[in-house]
Amino acid sequence: MPSFSAKTDTEQRRVAFVLFENAKMLDITGPLQVFADANEILGREAYVTVLASLYGGPVETDTGVLLNTRRLAGVGLDDMDTLMVSGGNGVHPAARDPRLIGAIRLASRKCGRIASTCTGAFLLGAADLLDCRRAVTHWNACEDLARAYPDCQVEPDPIFIEDRGVWTSAGVTAGIDLALAMVEADHGRDTALELARHLLVYVKRPGGQSQFSEALQQQTRTATGRFDALHFWMKDNLTADLRVEQLAVRCAMSPRNFARIYAEETGQTPARAVEQMRVEAARQALEDPDQSIKDVATRCGFGSDERMRRSFTRLLGVSPQAYRKNFAMAL
């Protein structure tokens, strides 16, 4: 694979999206919209996007919508262009098609930047493009990817990873984050931030940020719904005394019995659930530049900005200051 080359502001970059039967629609259209809107922000056709497949012609996505494609071998790519492989339910049959894998491998030798969205990483792995590289995919498929391609270092936490010209992203909407990062690499941070605002994305997330938003939302409810009412109360009372003893009183249980059953139902301790709720509330509050970090820590129940910093570092891998600086959007 040739190294990715810089272009001048007047040159175009081609981005070829590789499709297959039953590819996930959003894996394609999310990044596709980013590059289309980047052209609008930049006031010129900086990106030329192409939908490609093994043979060309209409390809049916997981939504039932047909997308017209060009033959992958006929798409002219050079060392300043990008090959982006989509994911979806059809990825495993596609990864077993030697003709498609061969076409991806051949195209990868021509372009300077290769990427996958979500489970599209399995196609890159089948084409030997993940060997001795770090990669990520949807959190639910990371173990499968690691088993299938043991020469790849699979990291389940980041929302996207770039390793020597090969970009991989986590589930679905992370493909938008990946595309935004590519625009930033090509045209600078100011353009990427303006583009994120244009797309109504709350934050422009760098790849090192954990795949935390969906996980936190899922962890606020149990499978049985037994603690739903408690969770709603906790989120509305983050500055209250949320120790096990007090939560047990609200549930009319002994502290020991409450802690045991809560862990069985949710897979985590009450203390960890409280910490996650406070971090999520603080994360959202930090997106408002008018709120000081100290005030956010107080309002979200941490008691001090140092305690909030430790929780952010433990759960998100970043400090509150770094989150605000690198993730929050200026309104």
Image (spheres, rainbow, N blue to C red):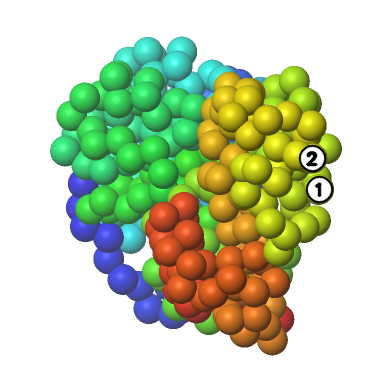
Q: Is residue 217 visible?
A: no
- Asked whether the residues under the numbered discs 2 and 1 touch, taking CB atoms below 8 Å apart as contact, a structural biologist would say yes
Label disc, if present, on residue 233 of the rendered structure: 1
**Image x and y of residue 266, in percent:** 61, 29
Task: Give the answer, above or below, for where 13 lies relative to 187.
Answer: above
Where residue 225 sits, quadrant-wise, is: top right
**Image x and y of residue 314, in percent:** 41, 55
| Mark earlier in primary sequence (2, 1) | 1
Q: Is residue 254 left or right of residue 11?
A: right
**Image x and y of residue 13, in percent:** 44, 62
Task: Give the answer, above or below, for where 243 lies relative to 138.
Answer: below
Q: Is residue 290 visible?
A: yes
Q: Residue at x 67, y 51 (%)?
A: 242
**Label 2 to label 1: alpha-carbon separation:** 10 Å
Q: Amino acid at mark 1?
A: Trp
Where residue 135 sits, quadrant-wise, is: top left
**Label 1 environment density (alpha carbons within 10 Å; few <14, some 14–19, many ≥20):** few
Q: Residue at x 21, y 46 (%)?
A: 1
The residue identified by callout 2 is 250
Viewer-proximal residue among 36 and 185: 185
Query: What element does badge 1 sit on?
Result: helix
Query: What element does badge 2 sit on?
Result: helix
Q: Is residue 138 left or right of residue 172?
A: left
Viewer-proximal residue among 251 and 176: 251
Q: Residue at x 59, y 71 (%)?
A: 303
**Image x and y of residue 11, in percent:** 43, 72
Q: Amino acid at mark 2?
A: Arg
Q: Residue at x 41, y 48 (%)?
A: 158
**Front of the two marks 2 and 1:** 2
